[in-house]
Each structure stands twice: as C-alpha cells, then as structure tokens.
Image (cartoon, coloured by chain):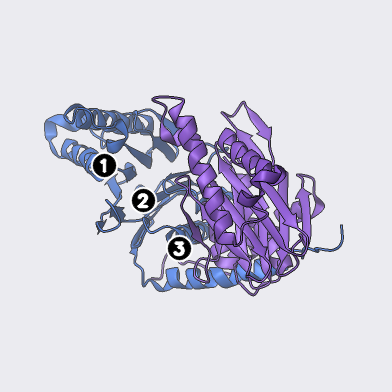
Chain colours: A blue, B purple
Amino acid sequence: MTYCVGMLLDQGLVLMSDTRTNSGVDNISVFRKMHSWTVPDERIITVMTAGNLATTQNVIGLLEERNKAPEERLNSLLTAPTMFEVASMVGKLLRETIARSNATNGQQAASTFTASIIVAGQIKGMQPRLFLVYPEGNFIEASADTPFFQIGETKYGRPIILRGYDPAMSFEDAVKLLMVSFDSTIKANLSVGPPLDLMVIEKDRFEPLHQRRVDAQDPYFLAVSAGWSEALKNAFHALPDYSLYSK
Amino acid sequence: MTYCVGMLLDQGLVLMSDTRTNSGVDNISVFRKMHSWTVPDERIITVMTAGNLATTQNVIGLLEERNKAPEERLNSLLTAPTMFEVASMVGKLLRETIARSNATNGQQAASTFTASIIVAGQIKGMQPRLFLVYPEGNFIEASADTPFFQIGETKYGRPIILRGYDPAMSFEDAVKLLMVSFDSTIKANLSVGPPLDLMVIEKDRFEPLHQRRVDAQDPYFLAVSAGWSEALKNAFHALPDYSLYSK
C-alpha cells in the first residue's frame, strides 16, 4: 500500500507521500512516490502515485522520456498549456499503461495493475491546481468543497484531516497536520512507512519553497508522534465525562 | 457497512455497535446489530454482527430458536459450559449459514454472504471473554496484547482506540473513547450511522451494568462530537510547530 496526501491551501500546495511498497509482508521496499518537474519562473508540476509499482513507474518513466526527447516536447508536461492538460496527459498514460499490462497478461484481473495519481502544480498566469487521476484516466479537481485528496491507505489518517484542515492555515500548520495524519496511519498499518517525502509549493514561486525527506529518526516527526499521544490524552480528558448512572 | 467494537477491560466488557445497514446508498435502514442473552446470576452473552444482513439475522434467529425449543436446550447459548463453546457454536452456525447461501446460489461469489461476529460475555466461575468469529467459523480471542476487536468499517476509528485504550480505564472513560471512535467513523463514512447501541458488562454481575441506545440527538454524543473538534484543535496547537526554514 501507500499513503499520499495533497492539500490545496490559500497560499499554495502541500504534498506528502510515504515510500513503502510491498508485495506481501515479506517483500517490502522503499521507492519514491513523489516526482516533480520545474521550469524556472514558469511552472512546477508534482505527481504522487499509489498502486501497482510497475504501472506507476512506467507512467513516470514515460513522462520523463517525453521531457527529454526534443521531438516529443510538444507532448510533454513541460509544454502543456494548462494544469488541466497535464492531468489529461497523466490520465491518458495511466489508462494506456494499465490496458497494455492487462492485454499482455490475458486473463489477469484488471485490478492487478491499477493505480491512482495525484497531480499538483501551477503554471504561470494561472492558479495552483490539484487533481486526482483515476486508473480509468479520468480525473477530478480539488475545490473549496473538497480541498484535499488522499490516495492509498486513506482511512486511518482521514478523520484528523477532516477536523484540522483549514484553507487559510499556514504551511507550517499544514505540514504538522500531515505529520499527524501520517503518524496515525503508520501506527495502524504496516503497509505505510517512512521515510516520507514532503514538498511545499508556494503560489507564484515555481520552485519548491520547501522540500525534504523525513526519515523515521527525524526529530520533528518523533516529537509529533510522541507529543500527539500525550496531546490526545489531554484532549480526551478535556471532554465531558460519561455517566453510567444519570440519564 | 457497519461498525462494532468490543473492549476487554480489567473491570469487564464495553460494547458498542451502530445500526446502519445499506445495500447501495439509496437503500439505508436501521437494524440492531447487538443481541444479548442472560441467565440471572449465571451468564451473560452478547454478540455484535457485521456483514450480510440476511446471514447475520439467520445466525441470530437460529441462536434464538435454540434457546426457546426445550429439546434443543443442550445445544444452546444458555447451556454451553464455557464461552469458548459459545464462540464455537456461533462460528459453526455462521459457517453453515454462509455455505447454505452459497450452495443455493450456484456461481455467486463467496464473499457476498460473508459476515463477522464479535462474541462477548461471562459464565459464572470464569473470566469475562471476548472473541472475534470469522466467516469460516474459526475465531480468535482477545488477550492482554490485543484487548479489543473491531468489525465492519474499522479503520477511521482505530487510531484513537490504539492511542486511548488502557485495560485499567474506567467504564466511563471506555464509553467516552468509543463515542469518539464512532464519531470519527460516522463523520468520515456514510455507511456507519446512529443510533448506536451501548452495553457495559461488569465482571461477575451477569446482567448489563448499563445498556442504552444513543441516538443522533443524544446530548452526550453531541457534546463529545462538538467537544472533540475543539479538543483536537487544542491538541494540535499543543504540538511543536514545524519550521520550513530551519532543519
């Protein structure tokens, strides 16, 4: 499994992904699931992937190839006129990759090669945008009503984001919120694990404002993890007490 | 879907279940998923069910029938010598019910009729015990290492139980913890909904210490739901702040 979250804020975008991949519990590896491309002063595009690793690596590989081959530049992420076009392109590559894997494998179940991709970024002159691309190649865009997307093992970490998210929050608070959400998921599910990749994209900057890998020994992540247990206990005790006997 | 939790505490057992059943989002009903039998001063047995409603109702119906027919009393929950025997009996009925549904439906997928059951209770002279019965009819028992079981839509409400559970906690705190866990689940997933059924079983009492239905307008549930948002915000702000610029 995997856990990736993309959040659209008033100030920009905050993205976090884990790096654990597994094919059974005895075959666990670390792979980067966050990939980013920038054209200085013009565009920044970041994608995060969940699902079959061969599928997602193939899509990322094809995106990379197009950026490099001069005759393909017209079709590339680096020249697409809008983020909508970028999401369309990623969706088309994803759908084609899954279809090819299924075709060459005969009776194999369609779900085996499935994957989902979060596409985030900004192109000069337009707003930062956030998309969720489905295995079928279609996609949805984040809006004020649904301002964040999760892919992979999404349930454990969802309640805290539902409660904590605010579009006006600072980047620092958004990172903190994601750290808590990832910590809750990692504690509950073996298939999600550190290190985590973090990227903060400030509006109109066209390069990451902040980008780093958060490993399992990261002092801030450890402080959040330990502090959250304590803070939750305090929160819990701050709630009114139940009475078995009144009522 | 469904959400049920059974917790084993030093003082006894605390059980909570929702009541929503759905077959598609346009076919939502309310059904009780918690069923209890007592023999005064001798035993109390409570089961909670998740999964296919026809399957679980059939199992509950068969358990009820056996309690009523005098010649079947030897096979009934009310005469089983141990909770282990009770769990075995529930498992056998569950497996047989699923097998019968599959057999009469030819090619139907096995998973369609699947269900899981939490069995909790105490028989005089023995400790309170808590079991999770699988669709295959086999089961596991809660222990000090795994002191609670969830069935149904378990993921949203799991992190808070992992953080908050303590075997020495009071019944009041355990009820509060379950209210928070159910509230988080209900907020995140349409297939889990109030009213909730709550039962507290004190060790060596052989009747419920406390039992009630918590509806959507229940003042305590509303207070927890509203208070938890506030408490989480405070907990969140109590955590150390992230810095984008230091390291």
The tag on residue A28 is none
Q: Chain of mark 3?
A: A
The residue that appears at 34% across and 45% down in the rendered structure is A50
Which comes sooner in the sequence, label 3 or label 1? 1
**Residue A201 location in percent, x, y?**
40, 50
Q: Earlier in the sequence, mark 3 or mark 2?
A: 2
Residue A111, placed above or below residue B169: above
Q: Which residue is mark 3?
A: A187
Q: Is residue B181 left or right of residue A141?
A: right
Camera-side residue of A50 and A61: A50
The CA span between labels 2 and 1 is 12 Å
The residue pinned by badge 2 equals: A2
Please indicate, yes or no, whether residue B178 appears anywhere in the rendered image: yes
The residue that disc 1 covers is A56
Q: In the rendered structure, the residue with mark 1 lies on which chain?
A: A
Q: Amino acid at mark 1?
A: Thr
On the image, the x and y values in percent for residue A139 come to 40, 31
Q: In the rendered structure, which disc, 2 or 1, sits on the residue that comes first in sequence?
A: 2
Q: Are marks 3 and 1 in contact (CB under 8 Å)?
A: no
